Amino acid sequence: MKNQYQKLQNLSTDQKNVSSKISTQSNLLKLIVVLCILFFMFGLFTGNIWSFYQKSFSFNLQFTQFAATNSSPTATPLQPPPSSPLEILPPHHDQHNQVMLMPGNNNTAGADNSTASRIGLSEYIKPPQNLMHDMKDEELLWRASMVPKIEEFPYKVTPKVAFMFLTRGGVILGPLWDKFFNGVDTNLYSVYVHSNPSNNETIIPPENSVFNGRTIPSKEVQWGSFNMIEAERRLLANALLDLSNQRFILLSEACIPLYNFSTVYSYVVNSTKTFIESYDLPGGVGRGRYSPRMRPQISLHQWRKGSQWFEMDRELATEIVSDRTYFPLFGKFCKSSCYGDEHYIPTFLNINKEFAYRNSYRTLTWVDWAKGGPHPTKFTRTDVTVELLQRLRYNNGTQCEYNGEKTDICHLFARKFIPNTLDRLLRFAPKFMGFN
Ligand SMILES: *[C@@H]1O[C@H](CO)[C@@H](O)[C@H](O)[C@H]1NC(C)=O
Ligand SMILES: *[C@@H]1O[C@H](CO)[C@@H](O)[C@H](O)[C@H]1NC(C)=O
Ligand SMILES: *[C@@H]1O[C@H](CO)[C@@H](O)[C@H](O)[C@H]1NC(C)=O
Ligand SMILES: *[C@@H]1O[C@H](CO)[C@@H](O)[C@H](O)[C@H]1NC(C)=O
Ligand SMILES: *[C@@H]1O[C@H](CO)[C@@H](O)[C@H](O)[C@H]1NC(C)=O
Ligand SMILES: *[C@@H]1O[C@H](CO)[C@@H](O)[C@H](O)[C@H]1NC(C)=O
């Protein structure tokens, strides 16, 4: 111990002797320390750089591609990076990059092939291609009662007119209507047929007819009975499934058009009012059909009568398929000889004043009651003349009100034409009704 101490002392006392040696040694030590620090810092630095590089690699890659694909010569590296890397990256970049681009998001496969698999609004609001469905009436009416709460459409709407045929068998005068619709843009109209399922004389329309495939799921209908109202609501509900249908016209197999399509279309689409007959009629066939048991929902002074052949807008059609107040009352207290189809909509309209206000109180379907009796005049083959058609078109010279002004056109359709009138109608129609 002492020896060692002495040795050290000797060393210290010998400092001057060995000073050059010692200074060389301490310099070496300092160098090593500095080198160590430098090495440590270098390691730290390179580590940071590496991780930073890894983080920004994908950005650099994408940025390079952005710069390469950007054709503008003024593009500088100072431009902000594009908001979404997915917009720029090619669809088949490697998996490693993808995970780093979307940290925490595992499921990038869907986004990867997005443009091919995504669908737009048009897919959501497409009307059903096949009119045959298995919905019960209750389900159909519920579906049809849906109304968008936002009233403004986010797309341009071309209004369609729904021509709804309530028939016993098929549309007997179908060939005349096919002429009427010939060459018309199919975005302007749609056709629906409610046909008695038990009728064994149903006419199968030809392949190229507008009636082909347009029959809705139908049920038994007896003329004048309550199931006639059910059939009308079934037609309205099916037509409401197509959001483009804005106007709804009820027709029968005995109806003919009196004007060409463009005249009919602009008349109903541009009308500020609906065309539903609704009037108060004293006597047996009017007020006499009212049942006091409909009180308090329907009183005698609210009871109305009118032709069943209506033209209405989408708001009223929706209200009628949604009606759970008056419809059941008619089902209970307006059967058989009450002829509910002549009272349900005229009375409904009279009670719901917001619709009454927008109604013209006239029908667009001409019919001849001149001979009296419970049924209007039926026109047969020999009745069909140019004079008759002209008289129907111009309402025998009387004018009607349309959008607050007088017009010569009061009726767009006429009934009742029996099947054997078809050939003469087809002959006269092009010239006198302006079908092309
Ligand atoms: C990724 O998906 C797997 C299985 O699909 C799951 O176990 C894992 O938790 C997911 N990771 C993240 C970050 O969502
Ligand atoms: C993307 O979608 C198309 C068409 O749907 C399909 O053919 C293709 O295989 C898909 N690609 C990937 C990577 O899933
Ligand atoms: C149709 O049905 C009626 C009675 O239901 C029957 O008398 C008539 O022969 C049938 N017609 C055809 C073509 O089957
Ligand atoms: C339809 O008839 C009217 C006259 O009633 C006529 O002015 C118009 O050109 C016709 N339209 C077509 C497409 O034939
Ligand atoms: C409705 O009336 C306006 C103004 O008179 C007219 O510009 C427009 O073409 C009409 N629309 C139809 C469908 O006839
Ligand atoms: C039509 O008008 C003529 C003369 O104005 C008249 O004699 C005839 O009775 C009218 N016909 C109908 C069905 O109103």
Image: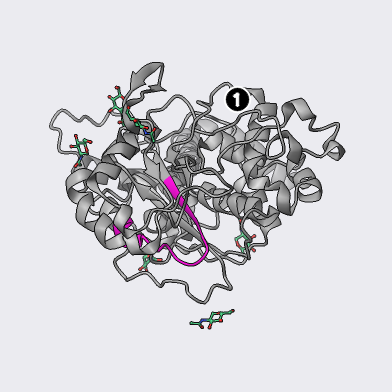
Asked which secondary structure carries label 1, the reply is: helix
Q: At 19% from the left edge and 39% from the top edge, which residue is drawn? A: 70
Which coloring applies here? one colour
Q: Residue at x 54, y 24 (%)?
A: 358
Query: In the image, is residue 86 above or below residue 174?
Result: above
Q: Does residue 103 appear left or right of residue 206 in this picture? A: right
Q: Nearer the viewer, residue 230 or 343?
A: 343
Q: Would residue 56 be seen by someone viewing this image from the given angle?
A: no
Q: In this picture, which residue range is highlighted in magenta?
A: 162-177
Q: Which is more toward the observer, 89 or 202?
A: 202
Q: Is residue 429 above or below residue 275?
A: below
Residue nearest the observer in this picture, 371 or 95: 371
Q: Amino acid at mark 1?
A: Ala
Is 71 positioned to the left or the right of 203 in the image?
left
Magenta stretch: residue 228 in it?
no
Residue 144 on image: x %, y %: 60, 48
Q: How many C-alpha atoms fall within 10 Å of the one at disc 1: few (<14), some, or many (≥20)? A: many
Residue 37 point in image, percent of width and height: 50, 39
x 47%, y 40%: residue: 370
Q: Position of residue 416 (x, y in %)?
A: 43, 51
Looking at the image, is 40 positioned above or below residue 401? Answer: below
